[in-house]
Image (spheres, rainbow, N blue to C red):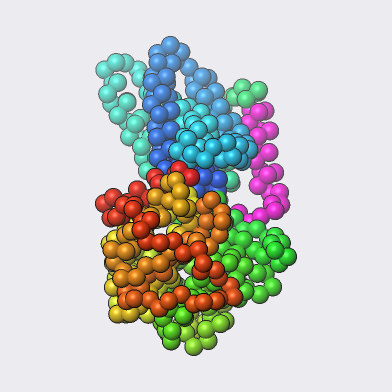
Amino acid sequence: MKRENRLLIVVFISGFVLMVFEIVGSRIISPYLGSSTVTWTAIIGSILTFMSLGYWYGGRKADENESFEYLQNVLLTIGVLLLGMNLTKGIVLEFISNYSNNLIFKSLVSSILLFGGPSFLLAFVSPYAIRLCLRSADESGRVSGKIYAISTLGSILGTFMSGFFLIAWIGTNNLVWLLAILISIAAFMVKPKVPLTLLIVFAILLVGNIYRASAANEFIDIDTNYNRVYIYDQVYDGEEVRDLYLNGDLHSRINRNDPTILAHGYGYYFDLFDFYRPNSKDVCMLGGGAFAYPQHFLSIFPDKRIDVVEIDDGLTAIAEEYFMLQQNDRLKIFNEDARTFVNDCSESYEVVLYDIANTRRSVPFYMTTKEAFSSISDMLVEDGIMISNFIASTKGGHGKYLSSVTKTLIEIFKDVRVYQTSDFPVGNFIVVAGKMNLPEDPPFHPKVDLSERIEPQKWNGLTLRDNFAPVNYMMAYE
């Protein structure tokens, strides 16, 4: 094969690896820092910074030392860095996540340490390959244009393959070491003979990655199209439970002996809909997760039906396989984005249960806005109610977030009440919103405490709109 054609394949592979690596970066970080605008900004910004340095240094080094051996060493070093990062990322992220409460700081430092080196060297490849392909200055424009076009085509393919297929099919950890193998193949294409030392280091790290991937974990690790999912079994409060973690946050919990018993206490607050709006028959729940509450609902309200909107069909499959979800004539599941569902909904519901924003690090901002809550209100009958769960606080950034969400709800609903369910610095807050005046709180409920009601005059936050809802920025500061 001609020298230029081999180099074109190499830059195509480097472009492919770079883009897959950038997209998979969010899955690497999310179990520790969540998946939000803040973490994505840190990942993209850090990678672009090191890419710019790599382009500069690659062009400079190409003029100083035009060598196929040097490019091969760079490619093998990329593989070594990818494999090393894959083995050590848990230690790095665990340390950083415990070091600070500032999500911006944690996201930036994590992105620089984990993604900086590989991004720098991957960007190095294209300008260096241009120099190796050049025969005369007269063809510099043609060669550089071709190199960057081929590299970009590789990045385009990497974007579509990783986003649509690879992450969900292969999983994050396996995908990283497969990228390392792919870049090592590119190194062999540059020159069949490779440096023994680098080859040995690469082989040791590769064996370590494969061993770690095949070793039994204390938890189940699954990548869906939307989430990095961890599933743990443990004993909690004397009960055998199974936990579902989404992007690093505990999302759902079931009792393994009886999934209709709620193991996550805040779920019982949703039962209050039967007090605030008695005789309701048609209920819609936004956010399904492991479907812990819908299973409880079906067991204690035999005369009612529930429609559940869950964007991630992978989560629905996980709920069926690991969380004992069974088909039921009174349960209908819609695997679509909650915002498109509420925007297009033609049915009327007496109750909406809102459990989308149940994470302390990131929420779908477009489901916290006045426009979204207006669409939910339109779904409800004239005296309908919405009961929501928010992970928030009364202080700091999470306090500003709760204050803003509540203020926005007050502009839509006639009667809004907020209850703090725990003493944790950041915990569950239940918001009950009625289109009409709600009855007085029940004097007693065996599973919930309504004594911690927060008065409306405290809500002095922002009115959240589709064009301005900085909720993830607020949540970056605990």
Tell me which corner region of the image, top left, top right, bottom left or bottom right, holds residue 459: bottom left
In the orientation shown, which residue stands out farthest toward the top? 64
Dominant SS type (magenta): helix
- Tell me: residue 454, above or below residue 393: below
Percent position of residue 466, x then y? 28, 55
Say whether residue 434 is magenta: no
| Image point (56%, 63%), residue name | 252
Which range is magenta?
Answer: 199-223
| Image point (69%, 62%), residue name | 236
Q: Nearer the viewer, residue 400 or 377?
A: 400
Please indicate whether residue 312 sits to the left or right of residue 176 in the image. Answer: left
Please indicate whether residue 149 sits to the left or right of residue 259 in the image. Answer: left
Q: Nearer the viewer, residue 251 or 100?
A: 100
Percent position of residue 100, x then y? 54, 37
- Tell me: residue 362, above or below residue 108: below
Q: Nearer the viewer, residue 318 or 411?
A: 411
Say whether residue 206 is magenta: yes
- Tell me: residue 338, above or below residue 150: below
Percent position of residue 317, x then y? 54, 67
Q: Is residue 468 visible?
A: yes
| Image point (44%, 46%), residue name | 396
